[in-house]
Image (cartoon, rainbow, N blue to C red):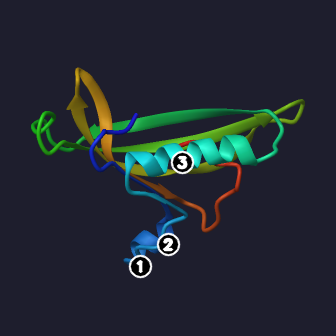
Amino acid sequence: FFADEAPLYRITSRDNVERGMALCFVLCEAQAMLRDRAIALQKTVMHRRRIQRRMISGIRLLSQGGLDGTGVPVRATFALFEAMGDDPSTLLACGRSIDVIVRQGGELKFKDRLCVVDSRVMPDSIVFPI
């Protein structure tokens, strides 16, 4: 999902963005950091089987050029739901994403992904990228 060279993935709160604060719940500044996070969480965290569903809407291309160069800026809204066992599905996070998408080897990938959640807190079960 992420570009090979210098991808940037962040999750922060709407309050932090509105106040101009750079504090993030999650910050991955390289492909290796993304891989390490996924592997560490899969191998070290004991948890019940989870099924997560992501819904993305309101996708807006903010520019049409740059797909093969600097990238195309994109905005969208998202909702992330989770189901565990026989429990009802719950909303884990919702908000907006501010992305830069590039083309790499015939595929579209995130060069920069900033997920701005509406809540001030994040559940610890968000282990995979939003």
Give the Cα distance between marks 1 and 3: 30 Å
Measured along the vertical axis of the image, is residue 55 above or below residue 29? Answer: above
Foreground pick, 37 / 96: 37
Q: x, y (%) of residue 21? A: 41, 77
Whether tag 1 and tag 2 are in contact, CB under 8 A, the answer is: yes
In this rendering, position of residue 115 left or right of residue 2? right
Number of other residues with Cα within 10 Å of mark 3, as a class: few under 14, some 14 to 19, many 20 or more? few
Which of the marked residues, 2 or 3, is nearer the chain's N terminus? 2
User: Residue at (23%, 29%) from the top-left corner?
Assistant: 104
In this rendering, position of residue 77 left or right of residue 122? left
Identify the disc placed on residue 61: none
- Provide the residue designation for mark 3: 36
- Provide the residue designation for mark 1: 19
**Local SS, label 2:** helix
Residue 127 visible within the image: no
Q: x, y (%) of residue 37? A: 56, 49
**Local SS, label 3:** helix
* Residue farthest along the top direction in this orientation: 106
Mark 1: which amino acid? Arg
- Provide the residue designation for mark 2: 15
* Residue farthest along the right direction in this orientation: 86
Mark 3: which amino acid? Asp
Nearer mark to the viewer, of 2 and 3: 3
In this rendering, position of residue 104 left or right of residue 19? left
Q: x, y (%) of residue 55? A: 53, 34
Which of the marked residues, 1 or 3, is nearer the chain's N terminus? 1
Kindly indicate the quadrant of the structure image that contains residue 51: top right
Mark 2: which amino acid? Asp
